[in-house]
Image (tube, rainbow, N blue to C red):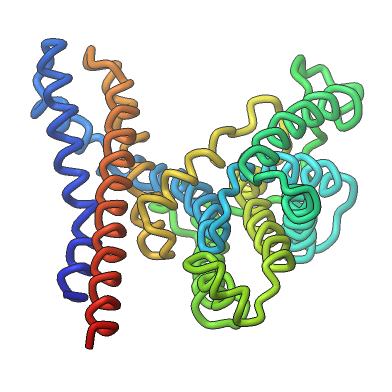
């Protein structure tokens, strides 16, 4: 029984992918486009050298964002505020990091610590409101997203804006060379790895750390047991209020890393066109990967592949929005599959428990 459930769980994304392509094909046929030709164009464009590098670069912030969301999911919390948390951390880190210059490793580490600390403190507000005021984290994090966006807009225009710049749009001062993370091709002299972000190493370390934290530590055990059965966790001596705050702070800390790849890699400053939407995309990746570091990595690469490969569609008179439909279909079907599996497991557990009582 356990083996069959595991097989069903792992096959759910593959089945969802097949059904999603089928539904998208019907839509393409409805608008008069050849689905086979469309997907072939996307695939051929997506496996080109430059596209592969772009896909990896795009997947880095998606993966870290998914990890930030997954920490909350493990606790039974829905941190929908990763979006605001990483933007707040990024703008503060960008401004403070531009005000000094030290040796590169320490400078980059300092910028990372600033972003992590700011994002963690911003997430802690939602944890405090839930514990002390009973406000659900979905409501508080959504509102904090709006508040954070407002504060960023004001700060970028009136506080952090680079003074005396002829640039028309508000932006923070540029990070000095010591605060910029070199691309891997520059770091190792590999011309084939054109502009592959150096933050890839950080993403790998984050994934390993997340696995160790959730599955190998007492804190991770408390998070998982509370998320699966909060009543049993409370009777076992776990302090749920303390754990809520810790989980939100940890999730926010991971969120602080989401925007650092673009910041340190190629933007080198915070501007009004800084990448947004990564926090919300991370929710989809976390759900698709079932909060597992490997599964989320595959999900991030898949979403990045779809986003990159869809760029060629406009040139072939195919609506680019088909990629968004694909993502939506995949996510919806996977969530439905997982919920069906979960309910089956619960039903089976109830049956097993009733049989034991009878005997």
* Residue 277 in the image: above or below residue 240: above
On the image, the x and y values in percent for residue 258 come to 60, 49
Identify the image quadrant of residue 48: top left
What residue is rendered at 50% in x and 66% in y? Answer: 207
Q: Is residue 30 above or below residue 112?
A: above
Please, which residue is most extreme toward the front here?
358
Q: Which quadrant is the C terminus positioned in?
A: bottom left
Relative placement, left or right, of 29 versus 294 is left
- The picture places residue 187, in percent across and down from the top left corner, at 56, 60
Query: Can residue 131 be seen by looking at this rendering?
Result: yes
Taking 171 as reference, is 142 left or right?
left
Is residue 205 something one can see in this rendering?
no
Q: Is residue 232 left or right of residue 23?
A: right
At a point 76% along the width and 31% down the height, the residue shown is 147
User: Which residue does the image show at 33% across and 41% down from the upper left?
Assistant: 331
Q: As drawn, is 33 to the left or to the right of 236?
A: left
Residue 130 image offset from top left, x and y in percent: 72, 51
In which image quadrant can residue 308 be found?
top left
Please report the residue visible at 57 percent of the width from the left and 75 percent of the height from the top. 233
**Quarter of the figure with the N terminus:** bottom left
Residue 285, how many percent across, how many down? 42, 48
In-front residue for pair 170/17: 17
Q: Is residue 43 above or below residue 200?
A: above
Can you say whether 255 is above or below 354 in the image? Answer: above
Number of numbered markers = 0
Which residue occupies the extreme bottom position in the image?
A: 359
């Amino acid at each position: 029984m356990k083996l069959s459930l595991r097989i069903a769980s792992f096959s759910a994304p593959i089945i969802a992918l097949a059904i999603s392509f089928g539904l998208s094909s019907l839509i393409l046929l409805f608008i008069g486009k050849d689905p086979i030709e469309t997907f072939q164009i996307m695939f051929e464009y997506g496996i080109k050298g430059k596209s592969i590098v772009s896909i990896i670069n795009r997947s880095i912030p998606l993966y870290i964002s998914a990890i930030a969301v997954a920490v909350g999911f493990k606790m039974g919390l829905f941190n929908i505020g990763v979006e605001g948390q990483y933007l707040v951390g990024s703008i503060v880190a960008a401004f403070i990091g531009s005000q000094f210059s030290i040796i590169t490793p320490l400078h980059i580490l300092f910028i990372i610590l600033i972003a992590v600390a700011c994002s963690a403190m911003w997430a802690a507000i939602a944890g405090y409101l839930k514990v002390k005021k009973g406000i659900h984290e979905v409501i508080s994090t959504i509102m904090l997203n709006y508040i954070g966006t407002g504060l960023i807009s004001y700060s970028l225009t009136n506080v952090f804006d680079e003074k005396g710049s002829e640039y028309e749009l508000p932006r923070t001062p540029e990070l000095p060379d010591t605060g910029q993370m070199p691309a891997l091709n520059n770091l190792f002299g590999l011309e084939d790895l054109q502009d592959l972000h150096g933050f890839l190493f950080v993403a790998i370390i984050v994934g390993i750390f997340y696995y160790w934290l959730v599955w190998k530590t007492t804190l991770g055990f408390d998070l998982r047991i509370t998320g699966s059965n909060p009543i049993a966790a409370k009777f076992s001596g776990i302090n749920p209020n303390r754990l809520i705050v810790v989980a939100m702070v940890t999730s926010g800390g991971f969120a602080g890393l989401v925007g650092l790849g673009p910041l340190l890699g190629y933007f080198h400053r915070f501007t009004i066109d800084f990448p947004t939407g990564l926090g919300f995309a991370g929710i989809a990746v976390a759900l698709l990967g079932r909060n597992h570091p490997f599964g989320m990595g595959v999900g991030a690469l898949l979403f990045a592949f779809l986003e990159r490969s869809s760029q060629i569609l406009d040139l072939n008179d195919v609506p680019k929005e088909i990629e968004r439909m694909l993502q939506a279909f995949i996510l919806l079907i996977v969530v439905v599959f997982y919920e069906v599996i979960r309910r089956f497991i619960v039903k089976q557990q109830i049956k097993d428990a009733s049989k034991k009582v009878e005997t």
